Amino acid sequence: MYRSYLVIFSLFVFSMVLVGKLIHLQFFQGEKYRELASKRTLKNDILQPSRGNIYADDGSIMATSVARYEVRWDAAVPSKIIYQSKKNELAKGLSKIINIDKNEILKKLDKAVNKKNRYLLIAKGLSYSQQKRVKKLPLFKLSRNKGGLIIEQQIFREHPLGRIAERTIGYEVQDNKGKFLRVGLEGAFGQYLKGDEGRRLKQKIAGGQWKPINDNNEKEPTEGFDIHTTINVNIQDIVHAALLEQLDKFEADHGCVVVIETSTGKVKAIANLGRTEVGTYYEKLNYAVGEAHEPGSTFKLISMIAALEDKVIDENTLIKTGDGELTFYGKYKVRDSKKGGYGTISAGKVLEVSSNTGIVKIINDNYKNNPKRFVDRIYNMGINKPIGLPIKGEGNPKIPYPNDADWDGLDLPWMAYGYGVAMTPLQTLTFYNAIANNGEMVKPRFIEKIGVIGELPQQIFGKEILNPSICSQSTIEKVKTMMFNVIDKKWGTAHNIKDRDFTIAGKTGTCQVDYNRIGKEVQYISSFVGYFPAKKPQYSCIVVIHRPNKRLGYYGSTVAAPVFKKIAKKIYTATPKKVHIDLDQIKSLSPEIVENKLENKH
C-alpha cells in the first residue's frame, strides 16, 4: 500500500506541475507563443515599389519600371457547381490570353480541383492589359471568396533605348559576396529612384506556399522620383556607333568616348565598350569614370601650361631636340616617334609634333633643381584630386610629389610626357574642357533635375565650378593656338583629321602599357582629346582606345583621332547654325537684293 500511495502521490504532484505549466503558458507566455505561431504561418510580404524613370535630355525614357503579373488560383474556393458551369469558358479565355491549348488548361484546372490546390500557378510575366483581361474571365470575375483568383504584381526594370550608355545609366549586379548592388546613376541616385516599399499579408498553406489573405495590400508601395539626365539620345547614338566601329576595325580590347557641353559641363554622351571572348563588344565597365591609367602625350599640355605659367619658356623659345633621343643615368631613354628627331624647334611646335624629347628637355632643364615648383603648379590646377562624381567607382588620379618615399630622378622627366602619372579619361577631359572654357574648370554632370512630372522639382542640379581659372588668359590663348595647329598645320600629329567645313583643336596621345612587365609584350593606349569648333567651342570630347592590334595601327592619330572627327562632324552638321542679319543695312537695299541675300543666307 505504501508503494501505491507513493505512485498516487507522484501522479498528483506531476498533474499539479503540468496544470501549473499550462496556466503559466496560457496567461504568462501565451502572447509570446501566439506571436511565434503567427510568424510561422503569417508574414508581411514586401512589395517592391516602382522605381522612378530615368530620362534623356529630350524626355526620352532611358530606364523605366514595368509591372508584370503572376496569376494563381485557389481551387478550393469555388463550389463544384460553379466550377463545372464556368470551366470550359474559363479555359477557352485563358487559352487566348496565355497562348496555351484549351484542353491542356482544362486538365490542369481539373487536377487542381481534385487535389484541392490552393495556390495553382496559371501564368506569370503577364502585362497589365493581359491581367485585366484575366480578371474579366468567367469564374475569375467573381469575388475572391467565390472565384479564387489570386494576382500578384512584380516590378521589372526595362531600357526602352536598348543597351545605349547602359553602364552609366546603371543596372543591378552581384558582388563577390553575393550581395546585389546597383551601379551607375541607378546606384548613385537610388535614394530618390527607389520609392517606398509596400506590404501584403500572406498565410502559409500546404506545400510550404504563401498565399495572400486579402485582395488589397496592407500598404501600397509608393513610386520613386524621376531623374532627368543630361544625356542626348542622338549624340549618344553617334558616339556609340563610332566607337564600336573603330574598336572592331582595330580589334582593340576596350575603349571609351565622352562628350560634354563646354560651358556647362553637361555630359551629352558616354560610351564604354569592352571586348568579349568571341570578339563582340558590350558595356562591360565604366572605363571613362573608373579606369585611371598613364595618359601619355595628352599630359604634355599640362606640362606645357606649367612651363608657360612659370615663364621658364614662351611659345617661341627654341628647344634643341637633337637626334630625337635622350638618355638618363646611362640606360633610360626617351625617344621621339620620328627617327632622327626634329632638330631645333619652337616650344609651341614641341606640342604640335608631340616631341617627347622636346617636352622632357623643357621640364627637366628648368625644374630639375626644384621639382616641387613644377608639381605644385600642377596641383594648383586641381588635377591631383578626384572630380567627385556621384557615380561610384571614380578612379583616383596619381601625380607623384617630390616628398614621396619612392620619388627618384626619373619621376620628373617621365612625368613631363605622361608616364608615372595616372588619370581617368573623364578627369583628362575635364582639364581640356577648362582650356576650351577659357580657364574655367567645370564639374562634369549627368543630372539636370530630380522630381515627378507635373510637380515642382525635388532637386535641380546647376553648373559647379571646380577651379575658376586654371591658369592665366595669356597662357590659355597660347595653348589654344598650339592645339589648333595640331590639326591645322601639316606637321601637326592630327593633321589627318582636318576638315574644311569646321575646325577642331586637340591633342593626340600614344602611351605604352606593359612596358615594365617581364614576359609581357608592349601594348598601347591610343587617345585624342579636344574640342570643337576651335574658335567658339560648344563641345569637348575624349576618345581612348586600349590595346589595338599593333599590326593594324596604334598611334593616337590613326586609331583615336578619326573617331573624334566622325563624332564632331556629325554633331556639328546636326546643330542649327545662327545667321546674323544686319537689319539697318537691309533697309537700304532694294526688295530684289534683299530677297536674293536672304536666299543666299538660307
Image (cartoon, rainbow, N blue to C red):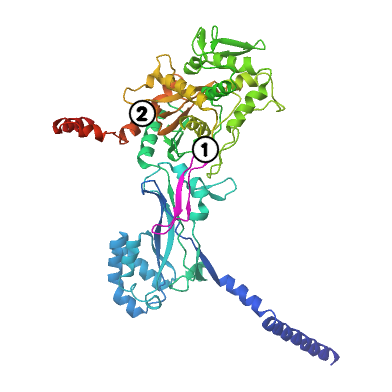
Identify which amino acid the numbered label 1 is placed on.
Answer: Val
Foreground pick, 105 / 148: 148
Q: Which residues are magenta?
A: 442-466
Question: Residue 214: x and y, percent?
Answer: 45, 74
Do we see residue 105 in this rendering?
Answer: yes
Which SS does the magenta portion mostly show? loop
Tell me if residue 557 comes above or below residue 543 in the rendering: above
Residue underneath mark 1: 289
Q: In the rendered structure, does residue 453 fall within the stretch colored magenta?
A: yes
For disc 1, the neighbor class at 10 Å (few under 14, some 14 to 19, many from 20) is many
Residue underneath mark 2: 566
What residue lies at 60% left-to-right and 13% top-to-bottom? 333
Q: In the rendered structure, does residue 400 fall within the stretch colored magenta?
A: no
Q: Quadrant of residue 489?
A: top left
Identify which amino acid the numbered label 2 is placed on.
Answer: Lys
Mark 2 to mark 1: distance in Å? Answer: 23 Å
> Which is more N-terminal, label 1 or label 2?
1
594 relative position to 104: left or right: left
